[in-house]
Image (spheres, grey):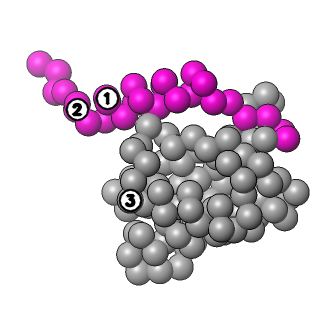
Amino acid sequence: MKKLNVKADSRQRRHARIRARISGTMEKPRLSIFKSNRHIYAQLIDDASGKTIIGISSEKAEGKTMTEKSKSLGVMIAKEALGKKISKIAFDRGGFKYTGKIKLFADAAREGGLKF
């Protein structure tokens, strides 16, 4: 008998709906975010060529708690993107609800200089 993981399946369905509408280009790459129990991962992706421009994880971020790490990760990715002359992005929340750590990450990226 197959074990059902309703929470993960719901997130994957939400992510598929989001990805149907959002794609990144070189001028406006997609900022994809993934959250696990221990870390947060973020990537700037050019979907037209299928390449990752910048990839970063909370393993390198400063802070003790995940909320502090998500804030510093947002600032770090904004700094690296501006270093590569990228200021406009398309935000892909990865099927996660826009609350908590995801919202803190997005707000910190906006404060860092990214526009979305």
Image coordinates for residue 110, horizontal then vertical, percent: 65, 61
Quote the CA–CA distance across marks 3 and 1: 20 Å
Amino acid at circle 1: Asp
| Extreme residue toward the left, this view | 1
In this rendering, the label closer to the viewer, 2 or 3: 3
Q: Which mark is drawn over residue 5?
A: 2
Name the residue at 36% across, 34% down: 11
Mark 2: which secondary structure?
Answer: loop
Disc number for residue 100: 3
Residue 55 seen in the figure: yes
| Magenta region includes residue 35 | no
Q: Quadrant of residue 84?
A: bottom right
Label 1, residues with CA under 10 Å away: few <14, some 14-19, many ≥20: few
* Secondary structure of residue under mark 3: helix
| Residue 57 appears in the picture as rendered | no
Q: Residue at x 60, y 24 (%)?
A: 21
Residue 68's disc is none
Kindly indicate whether the residue at mark 1 contacts the one at mark 3 (C-beta within 8 angstroms): no
The mark nearer the N terminus, 3 or 1, is 1
Stretch in magenta: 1-27
Quadrant housing the N terminus: top left
Tags 2 and 1 touching, CB below 8 Å = yes
Q: Residue at x 47, y 31 (%)?
A: 15
Identify the residue under disc 1.
9
Distance from label 2 to label 3 (Cα)? 22 Å
The x, y position of residue 105, in whole percent, is 53, 61
Along the horizontal axis of the image, is 32 left or right of 95? right
